[in-house]
Amino acid sequence: MPSAGEVERSGLLAIDLGLRTGIARFGPDGRLVAYRSQHFGSRAALRRGTLRVLRECGLPALLVLEGGSYAEAWQRAAARVDVAVRMTTAEVWRERLLTPAERRDAVRAKAAAERCAREVIAAGGLSRPHSLRHDAAEAICLGAWAVREGLA
């Protein structure tokens, strides 16, 4: 039980890095509970918005980041609220979730990630999205990978 000044952290938050950011929140049971895409218009807006996103999503036990660009802003925000961070690449989670044929090129990989993300959305009991941006789909897949790996 956290003390009066502490916040209980649970689950994980998966982020597909970029100015157009994919965000997926997984609960302590490993189920997807929320996802979205957010466009930060500039690096400065991203730097200002990362801490707000972490707090809006409920502070996770783990922040999982995919990609290299823009990671520093998320790492700084996580450090400010004492959230653990794990960095990875798309190649790592794709190898575990997608077939070799689906990973053959970027177009196929993005289509397969969308299919995979829709399966995770359905398994989480969330309503089917009308459209699903590739950054949100990849954040969902990243989070599913982290859950399967037992990271959170």
Image: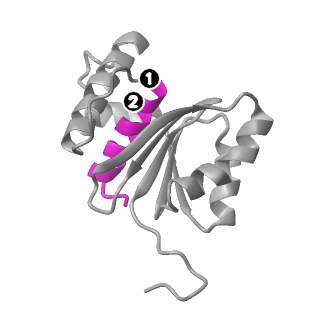
Contact between labelled residues 2 and 1, with CB atoms less than 8 Å apart: yes
Quarter the C terminus occupies: bottom left
Q: Is residue 124 above or below residue 122?
A: below
Residue bounds of the magenta highlight: 133-152
* Res 76 → quadrant: bottom right
Foreground residue among 124 and 13: 124
User: Residue lying farthest right?
Assistant: 44
Q: Name the secondary structure under disc 2.
A: helix
> In the picture, residue 113 is in which quadrant?
top left
Residue 142 is inside the magenta segment: yes
Q: Element type at marker 1?
A: helix
Residue 62 image point, x, y percent:
47, 59
Badge number at residue 104: none
Residue 54 lies, with reference to residue 22, above or below; the image says: below
Q: Is residue 83 left or right of residue 149?
A: right
Relative horizontal placement of residue 5, taking residue 66 as reference (left or right): right
**x, y percentage for residue 5?**
61, 84
Circle 1 residue: 134
Q: Nearer the viewer, residue 4 or 143?
A: 4
**Amino acid type, mark 1:** His
Residue found at x 69% / y 64%: 80
Residue type at tag 2: Ala
Q: Residue at x 62, y 59 (%)?
A: 78
Q: Quadrant of the N terminus?
A: bottom left
Residue 120, image x, y percentages: 25, 38
Across and down, in percent, residue 32 comes to 32, 47
Q: Which residue is mark 2?
A: 137
* Residue 93 in the figure: left or right of residue 99: right
Residue at the image position 51 percent from the left and 42 percent from the top: 15
Magenta segment's dominant SS is helix
Crowding near pointer 1: few (<14 within 10 Å), some, many (20+)? some
Residues at marks 1 and 2, CA–CA distance in whole angstroms: 5 Å
